[in-house]
Amino acid sequence: MTNPAPPDRSLPDGAEDLLRAVLMGPPGAGKGTQAARLLRRCAGVHIASGDILRRIVEREDSDLARAARVIHEGKLIPDDVVGAIVFRELDRSEAAAGFILDGFPRNVAQARMLDEYLASRNCALTTVIALDIDDDVLVGRLSGRLTCMQCGATFHTRFQPPREPGVCDVCGSELVVREDDRPARIRLRLQLYHEKTKPLLDYYREQGLLRVVDGVGEEDAVFSRVAEAAGCLV
Ligand code: AMP
């Protein structure tokens, strides 16, 4: 019996920048910001499971939207539900040019689902980047975070205030403090991250995909490290 061919981690000709990445890190580590910056250098789409779920809860009147309301309590959505939502996004043609997953997978079961999904499309992840950052720094960052519910841009009352208070610089919509960015919820989310997500680091380390990046410091400095880890150097 012959072994099945290994998944293709190589880059097709003419697609040196192709990236099929998972960006990991605790809440508030700056995954969204770093992903957006990476996609100015590499082709692909940013798929942030939390952003998609928030949009569904805000805009849809469906069973899925009702089931997903627990995001406001900082609790996790069932694996099959979030998997279906993310895979629907990955099936869009734009994702063929590359993607950065942010917020998914969050546990080993989700990572296995993702591997299976990608194998069924004859491809595999090219890299997993984990932002490493202390809880104390995160609590400080998240406590003042302001989020645009329209475009997902984030600001901070102290570190990155919007030009006009309460208004998104990017699209002009209202900025809000997310329910799950309140202190008790932040602690629950960090606890969940440590419990559920850290075993993922071992999972990806064993596959030789993991790059741990120091996530503390100026945004530009962190970005240089992330871009290098992703191989997106200009
Ligand atoms: P985030 O914006 O990544 O912090 O996600 C916000 C919330 O969405 C989380 O606290 C969870 O309730 C939910 N969520 C996002 N991604 C996932 C996932 N991969 N698995 C389960 N729940 C998720």
Image (tube, helix red, strand yellow):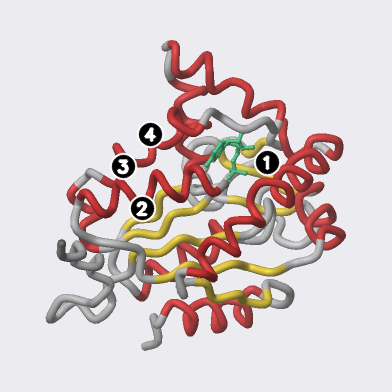
Quadrant of the rendered image containing residue 163: bottom right
**Image quarter for residue 146?**
top right
Q: How crowded is mark 3: few (under 14 residues within 10 Å), some or many (20 or more)?
A: some
What's the distance in space between the residues labelled 3 and 2, CA to CA?
15 Å
Q: Cα distance, mark 1 to mark 4?
A: 30 Å
- Helix, strand, or loop for circle 2? helix
Say which amino acid is labelled 2. Answer: Asp
Q: Name the residue under label 4.
A: 85
Q: In which quarter of the image is ligand 1?
A: top right
The three-letter amino acid code for the residue at tag 1 is: Gly
Q: Which residue is drawn at 61% across and 51% down?
A: 154
Q: Position of residue 155 (x, y in %)?
A: 66, 53
Element at label 4: helix
Amino acid on which the number 3 mark rests in the picture: Glu
Gap between marks 1 and 3 measured at Cα: 30 Å
Callout 4–callout 3 Cβ contact below 8 Å: yes
Distance in Å between CA atoms under marks 1 and 2: 40 Å
Q: How crowded is mark 4: few (under 14 residues within 10 Å), some or many (20 or more)?
A: some
Q: Find disc 3 in the rendering and name its residue.
A: 89
Residue to which mark 1 is pinned: 166
User: Is 175 placed left or right of 100 in the picture?
Assistant: right
Between label 3 and label 2, give the one nearer the viewer.
Answer: 2
In the picture, the quarter occupied by the N terminus is: bottom left
To which residue does mark 2 refer? 115
Q: Residue at x 28, y 53 (%)?
A: 118
Q: In which quarter of the image is the C terminus?
A: bottom left
**Mark closest to the chain's N terminus, 1 or 2:** 2
Q: Percent x, y for residue 24?
A: 57, 60
The spot of residue 78 in percent (x, y) is: 53, 28
Q: Position of residue 67 (x, y in %)?
A: 53, 17
